[in-house]
Image (spheres, grey):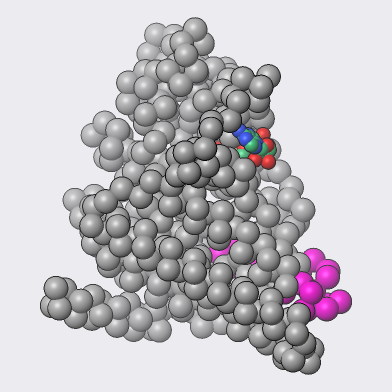
Amino acid sequence: MIAALKNLEGFRAGVRDWLAANLPADWQQHMLGASEEAHIAFQKSWFRTLAAGGFVAPHWPVAWGGAGLSFAEQIVLYEEIARAGAPRLVLYFISLYHAPATLLEWGTDAQRRKHLPAILSGDEIWCQGFSEPNAGSDLAGLRTRAERRGDHYIVNGQKIWSSNAQYARYCLLLARTDPSAAKHKGISYFILDLESPGVTRRPIGMMTGGSHFCELFFDDVAIPAENLIGAENNGWAVAQATLSSERGLTILELTERLRNSFGLLLRDARQRGLVADDEVRRRLVELHTRIEALRVMINNMLGRMLHGAGVGTEPSIIKVHYSELLQDFTELGVRLGGLEAQYLQPILMGGGYETGYWMHDHLYSWSWTIAGGSNEVQRNIIAERALNLPREPKLALAK
Ligand SMILES: Cc1cc2nc3c(=O)[nH]c(=O)nc-3n(C[C@H](O)[C@H](O)[C@H](O)COP(=O)(O)OP(=O)(O)OC[C@H]3O[C@@H](n4cnc5c(N)ncnc54)[C@H](O)[C@@H]3O)c2cc1C
């Protein structure tokens, strides 16, 4: 046990040294307000740097070119990446987590051989096409249709909120193959080449000024039958591999970034002569306490995962806690920043969600109470599964 801990600390020191030697120290200054093209180019170059260091796919098995790090080592790696303020690989999130988790658990060998090396070399960017205009929280209500014709499926329908789809080549697609089956049972899971005829991508403008995601339209799009992942009509089971792929490490990294950014709030409070203000002090202490409490909750969850135990409703509790904390944190930033913080500042792709450019940070923070399952839905999960409260009246909501 002690030897394992020593090894882990040795690994931490190695990661720290590597980051000190390879992280462009002033990347935030260079990239703040840069063009979209420059952001994408910088994401790609950071991907290549991480790949050269062996850190781009820490969780992938060695057999597929990953680093095969233990879960404990991955925790250390993400702690150090956050501590160093290194860019987040936002452009590659689906490619590095959701796509390989799905292919490794459910894909064919041919699908793995075609796509995993191409992802690892940075040649393939993926996005996720699950949500639809009337199927987000109620994902199983999706209506995009895939009909088998010979050795192809013909797809018609629409997806929405597909992150980074404007840059992606492939899409993890859920579509209905049996409309007569119960809604969870008639769905199949496909690899869709976004360059296929009949696909239209339309970026969605956000209130922050950027376009993080797209609408996708499918008009008689042909998908080869060999691109089906898992059996026809078993897509709901396959989707569970996608949705549980990142195992708490994203929230760990984001919480560490929040912790490290606390100094930005103190900086602004000092600059405005507000550190002695009772209300400001009360809010600073409250936020600090909530950050530390969140870190304890995450530690408990990761500890259980390290020992192979189930985590129940902990991810829901942690997601509600993190997203509401982030909103309050950035809202205090806007208040402390005064007038200068009121206008919309430039975007920093791949930064944390609390860059100190508070208006942008605060507006963006709202996405966290929606993405990955809204907080209302998370609260339903906590109420029903952790507290054993009565189930919500589904029929009324389904209308
Ligand atoms: C930044 C961001 C990135 C995203 N990226 C992707 C992506 O890459 N791919 C993808 O497929 N999707 C993506 N999404 C979509 C995301 O998964 C959905 O927005 C989310 O599941 C909520 O669905 P919805 O937007 O349809 O809202 P709805 O389900 O229509 O909900 C609307 C409101 O009703 C509430 N509500 C719904 N059902 C209940 C209920 N049963 N009880 C109480 N309240 C309820 C919700 O909480 C919400 O406030 C992204 C979203 C965001 C914000």
Q: Residue 281, image x and y in percent? A: 70, 83
The residue depicted at 61 percent of the width and 53 percent of the height is 368
Q: Residue 361, image x and y in percent? A: 68, 65
In the rendered view, tell whether residue 137 sits above or below residue 369: above
In the rendered view, tell whether residue 202 sits above or below residue 57: above
The residue depicted at 13 percent of the width and 77 percent of the height is 3
Q: Give the residues in magenta.
A: 333-351
Q: Residue 145, image x and y in percent? A: 54, 17
In the rendered view, tell whether residue 207 sits above or below residue 332: above
Q: Is residue 45 visible?
A: no
Q: Quadrant of residue 152?
A: top left
Q: Residue 189, image x and y in percent? A: 42, 27
> Between 22 and 7, which is closer to the camera in this rendering?
7
Answer with the quadrant where ligand 1 appears in the image: top right
Q: Is residue 285 visible?
A: yes
* Number of marks in picture: 0
Whether residue 229 is in magenta: the answer is: no
> Between 92 and 223, which is closer to the camera in this rendering?
92
> Between 279 and 86, which is closer to the camera in this rendering?
279
Task: Name the side, left or right, on which 271 lies relative to 251.
Answer: right
Quadrant including the C terminus: top right
